[in-house]
Image: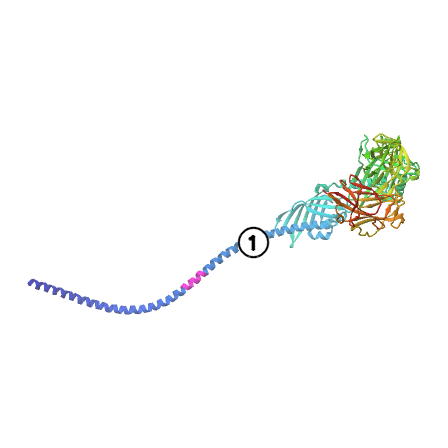
Amino acid sequence: MEGKIVGFIGVIIILLIAAAVGFYEYSSVSSSYSSLSSSYSSLSSSYSSLNSSYSSLSAQLQKAEQNESSLATALKYAEQNETKYMNEAENYSQLYMMYKSLYKQNAEGAALDTVLEAYDGISIENPNDVLPYLAPNFTATIEGVPFPGTYNLESFNNTWLADFFSNYETVYFYTTALPTITQISHNTYEVTDVVQFFVAPTNDPIYLQVFNASNTIIVQDINGKMEITSLTWMGNELPPSAVIAGYPSQHTLESNVVLSEVLSEINGLGAEFNPATIAQNFAPNAVLEVTGQLPSVFMTGNYTGISNIENFFSTWDRYFIFVAEYSQNLLPNGTAVPPSVSVQLSTSGTMAVVVANVTPFIGFVNQGEPGFPNIYDIHVNLVTYLQYNSTTASWQIEKQIFNATMIPILQDTLYYNLNMPIFKVIGEDTVTVNASQGAILQEGNIVTVIKPGTYAMLPNGSMVSIYNFSLITFSLQAVMPPAQDFFNLTPTYAFAFAINGQISPKYALVNASGSPDPAITIVYAPDTWTSWTWFGGTFNGTAYIGGSYKFADHWIYGDGVIVNNQFFKPVLWIFESSCEPVGMPPTPVSVTPKEVFGLSPIADYTYEVNGITGGVVMAGNMLVVIQPGTTITTPSGTTLTTFNFSVVFYAPQNVTAPEPGQVPFLVFAYAINNCVSFHYVASKPFITVIMTPSCGANMWTWGLTKSGMYGYVLHDPILIGKGIVINLTFVRPVPWVLTLPLM
């Protein structure tokens, strides 16, 4: 119990202590609370103030954040602009450097431009195009060509430029390489180059000169203008051939020209041109000095002036009918070389000398002239002096020495017989003839037709149907014109027939009854040709020697062709050329062909023909011989001796093939007075010659058949040669068709 009281008292004491302590603590806390409450009030007031400040600052912060975003954007733009600025700064730096380079180039270009402008002014040949580019203190040192010396501005203008412009024309320049430009100071430049001027001297424009100048030019910027203050010119002359690849030398060019003129004169003497043509290269006051030996018709001495020189050439042309000539220089050792030419080119005039010390002229004296029929061998030492005339732009002969010597002709024609006529074979066509078939021979411009039914009569009078027949052509030696009455004829060449290798009038071409049966001879030759018959010599197979003219022959004439239908003996015929037409070809006339037998005309050749004299009608690739003595009987019985003869061509499409494997190639008809009819008849056959592909050729008559239709009515006989078809039977003016095999 006591223990419980003690314990209870202890608890009470403890509670009292605790209460005392708690009261103390309460008082203390209460005091602190009051103090804290006061502080709280103060803090609350401060808080309110701070809260107000915070709100203000928060608003400011928000605005600051907005400003920060704007500033960040601005900063980004600034950074971008900074990059652009840096790029522009770099571009500016580059442009600045380029500007400085261009400025330098412009200055150098201005200096070079001034130099080239001055060169151009020299080429223009006008001081007003040169002087603006020269400074008042200009000096020039010219070494070599042209016009060397030391010059100031005045003397360069009055002397060098004046001499250049007066002495040369047609000036061109270029630099051989790009000029070099060096800046000496801020306003002074040095230009070095090699320039070439092509010039033609005023007094001798054919003398093309090339001045090659190595130049050093000082150019200075004076008051904003580039001017040349100094020129150093080192010039030399080059031939054009040295600077133009493949260009011949001037001497070669002019040598060829002057030699051509002299040889033209020599050729004119040989060809016997018109005297004015021969003398065309002589100067008006030229002198022809004729010396030495000449036939008596020529007078030696000086022929002064064109008219007198032409008189000499006129005498030459009249005296000789034929002249052969050549020109040479004969060296002392006997060697023959071409004529020598010496050309002297200079700015004051160009001279040339042509020497042909042995120029033989072999002249055949014309009939009717003194000394006929002599042949003179005249050797001329020809020396010709020429001067270039810049006014006429031609070389002219000022003087010519014609020193002649006559020598025996055998000295030049050592192996050439001028006494015994000799005919040397130059061509031959030989065939074996069967009398039943006939033959065609061709040699050169000659065609000979042996008609079917032609036999060979031998010297013993026998006739053979198989024989060798030859057409032979010959060159001539020692063959004069045929007779005194025919002095205008000139022998050209000859041809002959041969039977079994024999040329002799003892042989003949005959028909089955033994009467003459002449061959038909066609020669492509002008109407100034004819022939003379020649025999009496001997033939050894390669040459016919001797003989003489017998009589003139008669030919039938066409345009560019002559025909003979009288030769039946194997002898020679010599072609003679005349200055005038010997025969008269038929005269062309105009008609309008008609459609006949279902054929449409596409072309025609019509001539007026005299049947008594005959004629040859040319029609493209055809020729038709109307034999002399031909008359035409008309349907009314009238006989025509003069008539229009036509060859009319038709379209091959108008006809059909005559038989399998044959194709129409040529469709044509003859017409008498524009009539194609079976009712007209000629008294002699028309000899028809067609130049055509001939292998497998056939000829057909076209007309009205028994069935009443147009078609083929007759298969006509033809002779076939190499590229030639001949018919000898046509007597009516009707249509024919030439066919060829289908290939």
Residue marked by disc 1:
96
Mark 1 residue element: helix
Residue at image location 60% in from the left, 53% down from the top: 103
Which segment did they paint magenta?
65-73
Q: Is residue 143 left or right of residue 409?
A: left
Task: Name the quadrant of the N terminus.
Answer: bottom left
Does 434 appear above or below 231? above
Task: Using the rendered image of the protein, determine whether residue 304 is visible from the camera's viewpoint.
Answer: no
Rendered location of residue 9, percent (x, y) = 10, 64
Q: Is residue 539 left or right of residue 21?
A: right
Does 729 appear above or below 17? above
Instruction: Examine the structure image and report whether residue 71 is included in the region drawn in magenta.
Output: yes
Residue at image location 49% in from the left, 57% down from the top: 82
* Colouring mode (rainbow / by chain / secondary structure / one colour): rainbow
Task: Using the rendered image of the protein, determine whether residue 43 is visible from the camera's viewpoint.
Answer: yes
Rendered location of residue 680, percent (x, y) = 86, 48
